Image: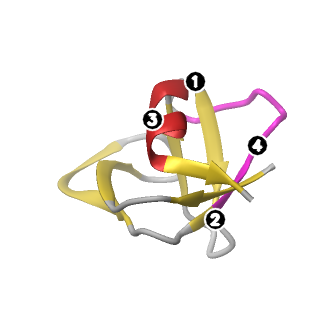
Amino acid sequence: MKYRSKKSFVVDSYDGDGFLLEECGKVVEEGDVYELDTSGSTIIGGELHLDAKDGSWLEIDRKTLEECFEEI
């Protein structure tokens, strides 16, 4: 399933090993597209893992998915 961001928002930023990058948050821009990883695996223990085409990813809860994304 693919989702498009309905609005811009900021989430914590993590490296590929799951370590928090404290110097900056990740900005999710309105219109950014992510694909839901349905394998159930996560890097930081988030409820949902979303991957972008550029290799970036984020993990959010269902409430954030419903508030900030629309299925496409």
Mark closer to the observer (2, 3): 3
Alpha carbon separation for disc pair 2 and 1: 17 Å
Label 4: element kind: loop
* N-term-proximal mark, 4 vs 2: 4
Rendered location of residue 68, percent (x, y): 45, 47
Residue 37's tag is: 4
* N-term-proximal mark, 2 vs 3: 2
Alpha carbon separation for disc pair 2 and 3: 17 Å
Residue appearing at x 82%, y 36% in the figure = 38
In the image, residue 58 lies in the stretch drawn in magenta: no
Q: Name the residue that disc number 1 marks.
A: 47
Q: Is residue 37 above or below residue 51?
A: above
Q: Which residues are magenta?
A: 34-43
Q: Name the residue that disc number 3 marks.
A: 64
Alpha carbon separation for disc pair 4 and 2: 10 Å
SS assignment for the magenta stretch, majority: loop
The amino acid at mark 2 is Ala
Viewer can see residue 2:
yes
The amino acid at mark 4 is Asp
Rendered location of residue 62, percent (x, y): 55, 26
Rendered location of residue 49, percent (x, y): 63, 39
Alpha carbon separation for disc pair 3 and 1: 10 Å
Mark closer to the observer (3, 1): 3
Residue appearing at x 53%, y 69% in the figure = 32
Mark 2 and 3 residues: CB-CB less than 8 Å, in contact? no
* N-term-proximal mark, 3 vs 1: 1
Mark 4 and 1 residues: CB-CB less than 8 Å, in contact? no
Q: Nearer the viewer, residue 43 or 67?
A: 67
